[in-house]
């Protein structure tokens, strides 16, 4: 059985186009830039109950003008590896908050994210309120910058979908800052251009 593989960079726009009426006569065309950034940090404490906290910030395009920024953290015991507490939440902001330069320096401007807090016991985690934090990041490429491009098409019922894309991605390292506290981080980023056409 033949498998249809669609690059991740074009998936958001294809999903939007799937909602278009099947009887639309003229072809529907969309093009734009897609960005994705994910980076994390681990900070450990010593003492009577040693713990480590893994913190991740993710930012990705959901439309040409909007990105979603998510923050998550998990604190766990280094003796039992049981989760002690966790926080997570996402917020939307303008696409200008996330920028990539030609040499793959990546900047996430100050963004407010509301996270929900949980305290965890041996069997379950319990919600413990929420808070709004300010998140930013500054990273740079620490390895080669990978480039890829392609085009393809597939048919779904009476509609034919054609797409093309070109993107770059790289391993990253740098710092994230949460409410004025800066920590080292590492991760991955990608940016690219796409074009999609649907004819039904």
Image (tube, rainbow, N blue to C red):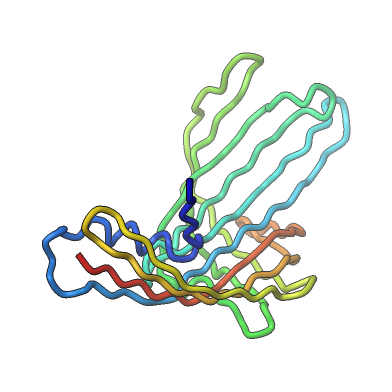
Q: Is residue 124 above or below residue 183?
A: above
Provide residue 193's location: percent of width, then percent of height.
47, 77
The x and y percentages for residue 184 are 77, 59
Kindly identify the residue that appears in the image at 70 percent across and 35 percent down.
Answer: 75
Residue 23 picture quarter: bottom left
Q: Which residue reaches farthest right?
A: 47
Q: Is residue 124 above or below residue 52?
A: above
User: Most extreme residue toward the top, as rendered?
Assistant: 123
Front residue of 77 and 40: 40
In the displayed structure image, the side of residue 131 where residue 184 appears, left or right = right
Task: Give residue 169's position: percent from left, percent from top.
Answer: 64, 70
Residue 101 x %, y %? 62, 82
In the picture, measured across the screen, residue 190 lies left or right of residue 21, that is right
Report the residue at 87% width, 25% height from top: 48
> Relative to residue 29, is residue 63 drawn left or right?
right
Give me the residue at 33% from left, 57% from top. Answer: 15
Q: In the displayed image of the protein, which residue is found farthest to the front? A: 1
Quarter placement of the C terminus: bottom left
Picture residue at 73% right of the left edge, 52% below the top:
41
Q: Nearer the viewer, residue 147 or 121?
A: 147
Q: As displayed, is residue 189 above or below residue 149?
A: above
Residue 161 or residue 50, whichever sits in front: 161
Q: Within the image, what quadrant is residue 22 found in? A: bottom left
Comparing 4 with 48, the one in front is: 4
């Amino acid at each position: 059985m033949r498998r249809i593989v669609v690059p991740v960079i074009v998936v958001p726009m294809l999903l939007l186009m799937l909602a278009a009426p099947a009887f639309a006569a003229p072809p529907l065309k969309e093009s734009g830039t897609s960005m994705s950034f994910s980076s994390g940090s681990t900070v450990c404490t010593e003492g009577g109950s040693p713990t480590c906290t893994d913190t991740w910030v993710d930012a990705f395009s959901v439309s040409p003008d909007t990105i979603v920024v998510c923050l998550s953290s998990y604190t766990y015991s280094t003796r039992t590896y049981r989760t002690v507490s966790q926080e997570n939440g996402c917020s939307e902001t303008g696409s200008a908050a996330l920028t990539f330069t030609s040499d793959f320096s990546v900047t996430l401007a100050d963004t407010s994210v509301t996270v929900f807090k949980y305290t965890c016991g041996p069997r379950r985690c319990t919600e413990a309120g929420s808070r709004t934090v300010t998140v930013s990041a500054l990273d740079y490429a620490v390895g080669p910058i990978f480039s890829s491009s392609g085009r393809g098409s597939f048919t779904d019922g009476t509609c034919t979908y054609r797409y093309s894309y070109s993107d770059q991605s790289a391993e990253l390292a740098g710092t994230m800052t949460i409410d004025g506290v800066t920590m080292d981080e590492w991760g991955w980023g990608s940016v690219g251009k796409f074009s999609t056409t649907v004819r039904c």
